[in-house]
Image: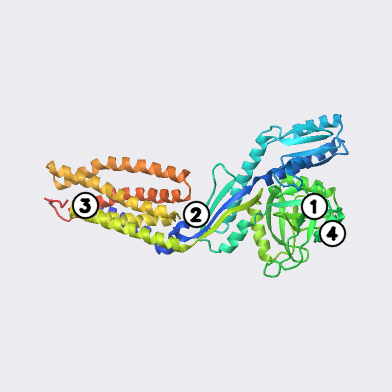
Amino acid sequence: MNRSLLYRGLAILALVALAVYSAWPLDEKIRLGLDLRGGMHLVLQVKTEDAVRAELDQDQDRLLRLAEKEEIAGLSARADAGEAGADGAGPVRSFVVAGATAEQADALADLARENLRTSDGDPAWEMTRRGDELVFTMEDVHARNLERQAVSKALDTIRNRVDSFGVAEPVIQPISGTDRILVQLPGVDDPERVRDLIKETAFLEFRLNDYPREGSSGVPREQILAHYGGRVPDHVEILPVRPEEDDTGRATDAAPLYIAVERRSVITGGDLKGAGPDVGQFNEPVVRFNLTPQGGRDFAAATGANVGRGLAILLDRRVVSSPRINSKIGDTGIIEGGFTPQRVADLALILKSGALPAGITYLEERTVGPSLGRDSIRQGLRAGLLGVALVALTMLVVYRLSGINALVALVLDMVLLFGGLAAFNATLTLPGIAGIVLTIGMAVDANVLVFERIKEELRAGRTVRSAIDAGFGKALSSILDANITTLIAALFLFQFGSGPIKGFAVTLSIGILVSVFTAVIVSRWIFDLQLARRERVERLSI
């Protein structure tokens, strides 16, 4: 045996051994997708009006602060009740400023035009007059941009949370043209906790108390209504206090309590820069947070001007705590509320991965059982084995003993394919099984091209060695053309396709590469090995 043949054989053996090492055992090394392994399927809708409302509250408050700096006093502002409805529900795109004279109105319009701008530098608000009031309406382009940004930020936030659990190949993508997000989580290790943390939208807000005005743990709703004489002011809303939890983190049966807070937010989750678990002054679990520079300035201004007043900390429109502001607070603070250590760890994880810019509505939620996956795997294996058996029979009948060459190459093709899936941490899906079956056909197709070329050369009177050389040489360009074009299509499917399509593209791409290797390199080595055993070869069983 010459050295070239030996080295090629050792290289092939090493590659096969590496593939076996990467893929064995299959049940541990090959990750299965949602359709095979089971898992969670969610369709979420982003409440984009929350993001728009938060922007409105911030700009409304900012305009009043700018007016104070310009010594324009006596102004008040509220969300436009005519658009939002009496109860404040519905999309809010405008706010009303009252108490401005005609000269002050022009000054306010200039302030809004110069300071309240979009990310592109265009004016974000249009001012109109309505009697003695000034109505600032958000520009449609700005509102649409905020809605798109809310969906994009929610997408990134959910992805960060899911990644922290190490879920294999999750599908997290927007549903084109809507405010909805598709989430598929195959084989989650702790489905209950993952479900709870994804549902925990963690829309964080800090709002000033209106009643009780100082820090409070909450009062009955009837007491709040009595304080306002039965009618809650437009700039105030009554929100529930998060129920107390026992040591296991479950809510107790204590009577529900409420706090009346201002509708406008001092800061929101979008102003967070980071968060982590910590302990409070009495060694109780708390969450410590840091703010962005702008968020820190807004927070410092609001707390500095309201010392002695309560500051409600809201998560998903529930008051988790309402401490009293004792002094001006800068760009760092804590969230406390009688949390358990596990609750603090989860809340810090949620906030650190990114607080959602808007609330989330769950339109669809279902758990895909693994029984469907087992049936799919069983049927896929049957289809694959049947395909291999029919291909093997055809190759043996048509190409006789040379068909064994193709079968050996086909077996190695499957070994290398699964080794590649394991090495790249790819996920096998039901469409991926279809890609494997297609790979079997494409691998044999390359052998057919070579064998037919060899037969043509033999019929032309060439010797066996010469016919084999010519067959592989002439078929190579056709094999590469067919497989490269298919590989390009597979790469486009992977780049732009959704989860199941990507699963098909992954197995097809890896299958194409290994099938070219086995058809051109392995099959040729087997022929050369047969020829090396005999000095003179008169016939070839093909």
**The one of 172 and 80 positioned closer to us in this rendering:** 80
Q: Which residue is mark 1?
A: 261
Marks 4 and 1, Cα distance to the nearest angstrom?
14 Å
Q: Are marks 1 and 2 in contact (CB under 8 Å)?
A: no
Q: Going from the N terminus, do you reach mark 4 or mark 2 first?
A: 2
**The one of 229 and 108 positioned closer to us in this rendering:** 229
Q: Going from the N terminus, do you reach mark 3 or mark 4 first?
A: 4
Crowd around label 4: few <14 · some 14–19 · many ≥20 (10 Å): some
Marks 3 and 4, Cα distance to the nearest angstrom?
92 Å
Marks 3 and 2, Cα distance to the nearest angstrom?
41 Å
* Dot 3 amino acid type: Phe
**The one of 541 and 498 positioned closer to us in this rendering:** 498
Q: What residue is shown at x 25% (from left), y 53% (from top)?
A: 406
Secondary structure under tag 1 reads strand
Secondary structure under tag 2 reads loop
Q: How many marks?
A: 4
Q: Going from the N terminus, do you reach mark 3 or mark 2 first?
A: 2
Q: What residue is shown at x 23% (from left), y 56% (from top)?
A: 393
Q: Which residue is mark 2?
A: 169
Marks 1 and 3, Cα distance to the nearest angstrom?
83 Å
Residue 1 appearing in the image: no
Q: Nearer the viewer, mark 4 or mark 2?
A: 4
Secondary structure under tag 4 reads helix
Q: What residue is shown at x 78% (from left), y 63% (from top)?
A: 281
* Dot 1 amino acid type: Val
Snapshot colouring: rainbow
Q: Of the numbered discs in the image, which one, if any, rests on residue 223?
A: 4
Q: Nearer the viewer, mark 3 or mark 4?
A: 4
Considering the image in quadrants, where does the N terminus appear?
bottom left
Q: Which residue is mark 3?
A: 527
Secondary structure under tag 3 reads helix
Marks 1 and 2, Cα distance to the nearest angstrom?
42 Å
